[in-house]
Amino acid sequence: MSKIKQLTCFFLVIFILTSCASSSNLYNTGQIRIGQSFQSICNLFVDVYISSDPCYGEKSFFSDKQLLLVYPSDRSMYFIFSEANSSGTSGKLILMTRSLEEATFFISSLN
Amino acid sequence: MRVILIAFALLSNSLIAQDCNGAVNNFEIYEDWFFTGICNNQGQREIGETLYKTGDENHGDRQVGTYENGVFKVGVYYWSSGAIKLYRNVEETYRNSLPYDNIGTYIWDDDDQAWGYWLSNNLNGFGQIEYQSGDIKREVGVITLSDGGYRLNGYGLRVMAEDDGHWYGFWKDGGAIGDVYYQLGDKVDKYSRISGNTTGPFKLNSADWDRYNLIFEFIDKERDQFNKEHAKTVEINENHDQTLNFRLAALGSNQANPDPNRSSSIETIASIQELLNELNYSTGTPDGILGPRTQAAITAFKFENDIDAENLSNADLLILLQLAIRSEVNQSIESASEVKIGSKLVGSGSGFYISRNAIVTNFHVIAECNYLEDSNSNRLEILAEDRVNDLALLSGPTTRNYLNLSLDKIEVGDQVYTAGFPYNDVIDGFNFTDGSVSSLFGLNRNTSEFQITAPIQPGNSGGPIINENGSVIGVVVYRLDDSTIADQTGTLPQNMNYGIKGYILKNFADLYNIEYVAKKKSATMSARSIARNAESSSVLVKCYE
């Protein structure tokens, strides 16, 4: 009986550990595509750690260009959405980059 | 990394010359600054050359060009060290969030070269630096002065000298940050540079390809824009020398301080320019100024004639050019007297280079010809014929512009472009059209041919069919004859144009040991870039009976 309990606990721990997937899988497997909507990208990050979830991170809205910059609190990736709204809940992905410098350069270069 | 350490006498050009009026020669306009040219009626320099003689940090330098309200506008600055810069001043403005106030090209005294957008004397925006030595061959992208040198700071490309590998990425102070793409031949890998650590290689996913294309297109677009801007500068620079000569002659110079040595040197350089132009190395209008274009023409002449001498004097160069002209004239007399005299131009077709001197065309373009030449009257000779597949290989003058052959299978729907010289007697020029692959077969299910929708006309025969990567996928061969089909069916055919498949061409070239470059799919090129490559690689094939 105690063996069954031990095994159950073991699988429970494994389940808890693996249920929060790494965000790098999302980036490397190509599940995120340019042109995707803000909402569909947020849906992909449901299972990742909150610190890696851009939809729970920082947001900046550039009203003159209708651009939205979002990034997770661990700053592992920066996402730029066009046609965004000021509340930062919509838009179409136009760039995904690992550097804030590139994100700001990209935004400032867009006419 | 390069940086211009030499002081640049741009900022002090607005000085008003009180006594300068009309045409002057070696006129001391301001403390050891000597001006030859035209001043306006407010005493301001308008067009001409300023020589910074002594007692100034710019001494020995000179500046040739036009002025607006006494402020230098367009022209060339020659440093006494040997460095030169051809540029055009503009009102300070921003591009890619960086300010610039002049656009131009700069050649260091060791022949490294830079072009782009400048803020005063420093590159500050999109540009390119070409290195003659060191690990890096070329950097192109957003370049600024940082950390004591010119460095990529924005989107850019670094080309390595050792293997011609191309690094595309976003750069900060010359170092790639984030994901960076390494292209070697047709292969592209991703590396990640985070906090100074590099990992990889990785395969590119779809978002990576999008970003890679974004960087590629950014460079392409900015380069196109710069080329347009620079073309304006070159045109104004060429015109102002003519204007200056004309106006000096009309007004009469005051001959205050004639300098016989300088005028003799100008004459020699003007003669060099004339001979280079005659040999088809373009220097623009001969003006006696050793500008970037003339220097480039001299370098090209030396390269193509295997002349190694680095310190060749102008007089020696003039002699070598005279000998080259003489040898070329002799050759053309020989070939003309052998074959062309009495020949009649009976038609023309198109062709394209697939190596430095091998040209592909259709057999039917050359079948009835006794003599062949290109648009510059260079003789073309037949290397090989394939009557069954309607192909021919010709040899022509050596070029550096040739098209790669594609290694990819074609598919219905693929975007294609055709290039050539249709209706040459009427249109008289290069023509470029686009369309798509509409069938993988030719007429009567001929599997060595395919059908395209890109318009072709008589004279296009033998021209390349190019995919969106800029590689050749076929050779234009024929289109359905409108009147015959109309007679037979009562309807006019539309877009029934055919090409010979690329693999037939590859087999043909292999059979005759003609070298060519074959490439698998890489980055998509803009139509404009493809057109430019196609134009420089295409040949008008003129047929004489």
Image (spheres, rainbow, N blue to C red):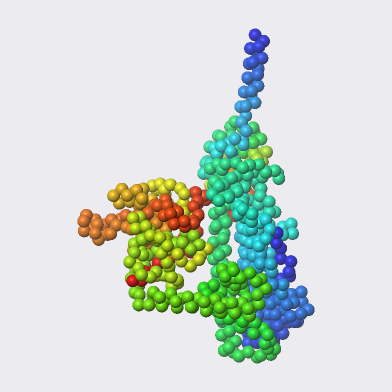
For residue A4, above or below residue B206: above
Which residue shows up at 54% across the image and 76% down it?
B324
* Tally of marks: 0
* Residue B510 location (% of width, % of height): 45, 54
For residue B495, above or below residue B323: above
Q: Residue furthest top?
A: A1
- Which is more toward the observer, B78 or A95? B78
- Would you say residue B84 is visible in this rendering? no
Q: Quadrant of the N terminus of chain B?
A: bottom right
Judge from the rendering whether residue B296 lies leftward or rightward of residue B518; answer left or right. right
The image quadrant that residue B538 belongs to is bottom left
- Which is more toward the observer, B309 or A41? B309
Which residue shows up at 63% across the image and 69% down it?
B308
- Which is more toward the observer, B465 or B119? B465
Q: Quadrant of the C terminus of chain B?
A: bottom left
- Which is more toward the observer, B369 or B529? B369
- Would you say residue B294 is visible in this rendering? yes
* Residue B68 location (% of width, % of height): 62, 77
Which residue shows up at 64% across the image and 45% down it?
B178
* Residue B325 location (% of width, % of height): 53, 78
The image quadrant that residue B102 belongs to is bottom right
Judge from the rendering whether residue B57 lies leftward or rightward of residue B442; answer left or right. right
* Residue B394 location (% of width, % of height): 42, 63
Which residue shows up at 58% across the image and 86% down it?
B247
